[in-house]
Image (spheres, rainbow, N blue to C red):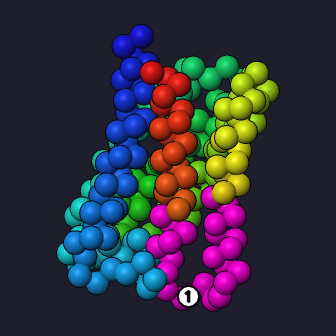
């Protein structure tokens, strides 16, 4: 029972730390704008907020480990297990975004893996939940995954990929991920 509580707490604490570091970085950065920046600008080498942004991503990812363990143990359908494993890959991508800041060779693959694995994890875990007899929970997961991908499709459809403002779909994706973690963590507690 104690393990479930720790896992549930980790599922709330991890996104709180991560989103808190991101939002604090947007407030204190002298150069960040929502319409002209990517979130990763906050962690770019030489940025005043690099320590906060990159540290927040790495710490938040590590804090989620107990959540992943409990979520895997509590999964009852094979697809839920696969979803948690994909979620682990998403969190590894998030951690690596902090390790490889904007401007380094591996930054883009790390960031891309976070968003892609997040969407896949939500869809697959949600499908497993539907098949395991918790359709409401499963459909919430699936729809959060759809919301994440739709945000990116709408952003891409509005202009060239090299334009500013990438921070908006990135932040929406981060919030979708955080909502799912908190939603799922409440069940674990």
* In the image, farthest residue toward the right: 131
Is residue 62 or residue 188 the one in the foreground? 188
Magenta: main secondary structure equals helix
For the magenta stretch, what is the residue range?
148-171
Residue 123 picture location, percent across and down: 71, 45
Residue 111 picture location, percent across and down: 50, 64
* Residue 172 belongs to the span the image colors magenta: no
For the C terminus, the quadrant is top left
Q: Residues within 10 Å of mark 1 (few under 14, many from 20)?
A: few
Is residue 105 or residue 92 the one in the foreground? 92
* Residue 150 belongs to the span the image colors magenta: yes
Q: Quadrant of residue 24?
A: bottom left
For the N terminus, the quadrant is top left
Tell me: residue 72, above or below residue 57.
Answer: above
* In the image, farthest residue toward the front: 136
Q: Residue under circle 1?
A: 162
The residue located at (54%, 59%) in the rendering is 173
Report the label total.
1
* Helix, strand or loop under label 1: loop
The residue located at (45%, 69%) in the rendering is 107
The residue located at (67%, 61%) in the rendering is 149
Is residue 46 or residue 17 the one in the foreground? 17
Q: Is residue 79 at all visible to an observer of this figure?
A: no
Tell me: residue 127, above or below residue 123.
Answer: above
Q: Is residue 189 left or right of residue 128?
A: left
Residue 113 picture location, percent across and down: 56, 59
Tell me: residue 138, above or below residue 19.
Answer: above
């Amino acid at each position: 029972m104690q393990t479930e509580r720790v896992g549930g707490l980790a599922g709330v604490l991890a996104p709180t730390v991560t989103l808190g570091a991101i939002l604090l970085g947007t407030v204190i950065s002298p150069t960040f704008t929502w319409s002209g920046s990517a979130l990763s600008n906050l962690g770019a080498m030489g940025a005043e907020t690099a320590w906060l942004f990159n540290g927040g991503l790495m710490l938040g990812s590590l804090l989620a480990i107990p959540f992943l363990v409990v979520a895997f143990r509590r999964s009852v359908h094979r697809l839920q297990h696969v979803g948690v494993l994909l979620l682990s890959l998403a969190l590894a991508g998030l951690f690596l975004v902090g390790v490889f800041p904007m401007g380094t060779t591996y930054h883009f693959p790390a960031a891309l893996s976070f968003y892609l694995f997040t969407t896949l994890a939500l869809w697959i875990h949600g499908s497993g939940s539907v098949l395991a007899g918790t359709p409401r929970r499963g459909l919430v997961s699936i729809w959060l995954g759809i919301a994440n991908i739709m945000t990116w499709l709408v952003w891409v459809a509005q202009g060239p990929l090299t334009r500013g403002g990438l921070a908006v779909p990135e932040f929406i994706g981060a919030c979708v991920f955080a909502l799912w973690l908190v939603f799922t963590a409440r069940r674990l507690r």
